[in-house]
Image (cartoon, rainbow, N blue to C red):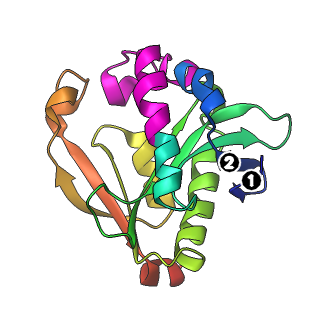
């Protein structure tokens, strides 16, 4: 399948209907899901019947240019997780969310920063975006560090959604980081 985006060490591609097992394996790791569900895995049927169809529909909706993208190591081809670049459901089309979910084996290797930096470049140079934003829990220092390394700035604190209240650190709420095209160009 054609690459959506390539970096020095990563290749990102669109998910296919055959990729459910990759998502199931990723979401079954309690450490990966720590700041999302308190470590509770996503049920396989939810991934197969809800998440994956929504991912594939997103490619149709946004002409294949935005959505959730499977990430692989170029050297060896291992699936390491996914990156996201997409607008909010009812949000403006020139403001997109940047996100990532990586397997533990990929943590601490700079992949989150590398993939995100390349997506920022694509968003601002090829896709005509005005702003890119990302959200995480206040206590998720790993994700916050990546956002800061990308030049994103803390824009707001956000309340914890009800479904995340049982998650460790939820009492501290969340944070939203942003970067505009102008800020990105000045780096």
The local crowd at label 2, few if under 14, some if 14 to 19, many if 20 or more residues have their Cα within 10 Å, is some
Q: Along the line of sight, which residue is nearer the eye, 166 or 83?
A: 83
Q: Horizontal and vertical percent for residue 156? A: 21, 59
- Quarter of the rendering containing residue 95: bottom left
Q: Is residue 156 visible?
A: yes
* Residue 13, disc: 2
Q: Residue at x 30, y 37 (%)?
A: 139
- Secondary structure category for the residue under label 1: loop
Cα separation, mark 2 vs mark 1, equals 5 Å
Q: Main secondary structure of the magenta part?
A: helix
Q: Residue at x 23, y 29 (%)?
A: 169
Mark positioned earlier in the residue sequence (2 or 1)? 1
Q: Along the line of sight, which residue is nearer the eye, 69 or 38?
A: 69
Q: Residue at x 48, y 42 (%)?
A: 55
Residue 40 within the segment the image draws in magenta: yes
Q: Which residue is mark 1?
A: 3
* Residue 37, disc: none
In the rendered image, the vertical position of residue 47 relative to residue 128, given as above or below = above
Q: Give the extent of the magenta segment.
A: 25-54
In the rendered image, the vertical position of residue 186 relative to residue 149, given as above or below = below
> Contact (CB < 8 A) between labels 2 and 1?
yes
- Secondary structure category for the residue under label 2: strand
Q: Is residue 100 visible?
A: no
């Amino acid at each position: 399948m054609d690459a959506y985006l390539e970096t020095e060490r990563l290749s990102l591609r669109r998910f296919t209907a055959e990729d459910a097992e990759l998502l199931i394996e990723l979401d079954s790791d309690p450490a990966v899901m720590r700041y999302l569900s308190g470590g509770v895995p996503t049920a396989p049927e939810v991934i197969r019947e809800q998440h994956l169809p929504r991912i594939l529909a997103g490619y149709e909706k946004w002409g294949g240019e935005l959505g959730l993208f499977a990430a692989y190591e170029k050297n060896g081809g291992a699936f390491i997780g996914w990156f996201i670049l997409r607008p909010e459901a009812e949000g403006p089309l020139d403001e997109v969310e940047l996100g990532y979910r990586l397997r533990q084996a990929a943590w601490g290797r700079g992949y989150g920063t590398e993939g995100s930096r390349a997506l920022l470049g694509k968003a601002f140079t090829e896709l005509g975006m005005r702003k890119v934003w990302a959200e995480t829990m206040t206590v998720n220092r790993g994700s916050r560090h990546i956002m800061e390394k990308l030049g994103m700035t803390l824009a707001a604190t956000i309340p914890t959604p009800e479904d995340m209240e049982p998650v460790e650190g939820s009492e501290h709420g969340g944070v939203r980081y942003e970067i505009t095209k102008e800020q990105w160009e000045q780096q």
